[in-house]
């Protein structure tokens, strides 16, 4: 029996920017070719479904609009294999939406955090290290650039935004962010 879901959410990715430099081919296969395979299955097997693709703010790279923000119309200029793979997937979704009249959306998400975040991401590295320091299992916390800035949101809110995208009358691409940036130093100071 063929499954015909109402909604398809692709959240799968090799999602660590720094690691994408170590394994660029795997990153491209997972983040771009994997999306191509999903879109083909969507088109051929369940074209009445609605499709969500988890895109990334890393697609913008250093590209910022004159007002200091990044939005759906900001030029995409990725600065990592991860960002490049996400741009490829983003463009595939747009192509399938227009060429095959599919309901396919890109959610361009800025950083979204939860307790499930793996410890190779800075937020979990900080919280886990501080707990280890407090309990005497670790002496210090070592971080890279403390002035690096991120827009951090709460993952649960971002998941609701994903769902809302697929509830619209027409498919489109959306940026999901808090609109506020904070440095790694600020994260450490409040933790």
Image: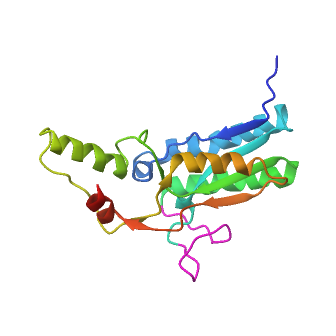
* Image color mode: rainbow
Which residue occupies 44% across, 48% down?
Answer: 16
Viewer-closest of 181 and 35:
181
Viewer-closest of 128 and 47:
128
Which residue occupies 68% across, 59% down?
Answer: 174
Q: Is residue 72 magenta?
A: yes
Residue 25: image location, x then y, percent = 51, 45
Q: Quadrant of the C terminus?
A: bottom left
Residue 144: image location, x then y, percent = 27, 60
Figure quadrant of residue 63: bottom right
Q: Main secondary structure of the magenta part?
A: loop
Q: Is residue 60 magenta?
A: no
Q: Is residue 98 above or below residue 66?
A: above
Outermost top residue: 1
Instruction: Report how many numbered discs are placed on residues in the image.
Output: 0
Residue 177: image location, x then y, percent = 56, 61
Q: Quadrant of the N terminus?
A: top right
Q: Is residue 25 above or below residue 68?
A: above
Viewer-closest of 111 and 80:
111
Which residue occupies 48% across, 48% down?
Answer: 24
Outermost bottom residue: 66
> What are the residue bounds of the magenta stretch?
63-79
Which residue occupies 40% across, 53% down?
Answer: 18
Figure quadrant of residue 129: top left
Residue 104 appears left or right of 29: right
Residue 72: image location, x then y, percent = 67, 66
């Amino acid at each position: 029996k063929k499954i015909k879901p109402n909604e398809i959410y692709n959240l799968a990715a090799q999602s660590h920017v720094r690691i994408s430099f170590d394994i660029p081919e795997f990153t491209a296969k997972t983040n771009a070719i994997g999306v191509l395979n999903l879109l083909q299955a969507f088109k051929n097997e369940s074209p009445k479904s609605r499709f969500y693709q988890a895109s990334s703010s890393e697609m913008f790279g250093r590209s910022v609009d004159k007002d200091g923000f990044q939005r759906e119309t900001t030029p995409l200029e990725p600065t990592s294999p991860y960002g490049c793979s996400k741009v490829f997937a983003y463009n595939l979704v747009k192509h399938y939406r227009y060429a095959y009249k599919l309901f396919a959306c890109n959610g361009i998400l800025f950083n979204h955090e939860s307790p499930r975040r793996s410890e190779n991401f800075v937020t979990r590295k900080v919280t886990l290290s501080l707990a280890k320091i407090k309990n005497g299992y670790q002496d210090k916390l070592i971080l890279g650039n403390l002035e690096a800035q991120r827009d951090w949101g709460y993952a649960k809110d971002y998941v609701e935004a994903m769902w809302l995208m697929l509830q619209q009358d027409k498919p489109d691409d959306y940026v999901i962010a808090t609109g506020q940036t904070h440095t790694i130093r600020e994260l450490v100071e409040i933790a």
